[in-house]
Amino acid sequence: MNPVKKTNIFQKLAENNPGKYDENFGQPWTNEEEIKLLRLVDKNKSIDDISKEHKRSAGGIRGKLSNIAYKMYNENKTIDEIQNKLKLLDNEQIQKAINKHKNKNKNKNEIGRAHV
């Protein structure tokens, strides 16, 4: 599999700060990585273990889990169902992720209407 090229800003940050950023810093997640992430969560691996496995920061792992939580919410999963699947996020973190994405989408819609 060919690695996805990093965007300029992420590439520059990594180049200007050798050793500071994880190997996959700034790269989009592949479907395979997401599946692997969910398998590791299901095996009760820690955020630190998962971040090493994915060569991403702990914050990157939490961010991806938050995105998955919102996706599951949009698929009409309950908070409890989401928490059972994404064991590393508690109910409060899941609710925060949902609210954050809802507000982000609301703001996008408002900006879009302002330009009409």
Image (spheres, helix red, strand yellow):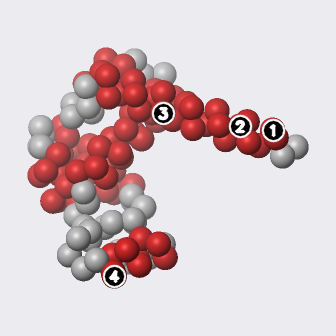
Q: Residue at x 29, y 43 (%)?
A: 62
Q: Residue at x 40, y 77 (%)?
A: 11
Label 1 – label 3 distance at C-alpha: 20 Å
Indicate which disc residue 100 carries: 3
Q: Residues within 10 Å of mark 4 (few under 14, many from 20)?
A: few
Res. 107 image quadrant: top right
Indicate which disc residue 15 carries: 4
Indicate which disc residue 99 carries: none
Residue marked by disc 1: 113
SS at mark 2?
A: helix
Q: Residues within 10 Å of mark 3 (few under 14, many from 20)?
A: some
Amino acid under disc 1: Arg
Amino acid under disc 3: Lys
Q: Residue at x 36, y 46 (%)?
A: 64
**Circles 2 and 1: CB atoms closer than 8 Å:** yes
SS at mark 4?
A: helix
Q: Residue at x 31, y 52 (%)?
A: 60
Label 4 – label 1 distance at C-alpha: 39 Å
Amino acid under disc 4: Glu
Res. 2 image quadrant: bottom left
Indicate which disc residue 109 carries: 2
**Circles 4 and 3: CB atoms closer than 8 Å:** no
**Circles 4 and 1: CB atoms closer than 8 Å:** no
Label 2 – label 1 distance at C-alpha: 6 Å
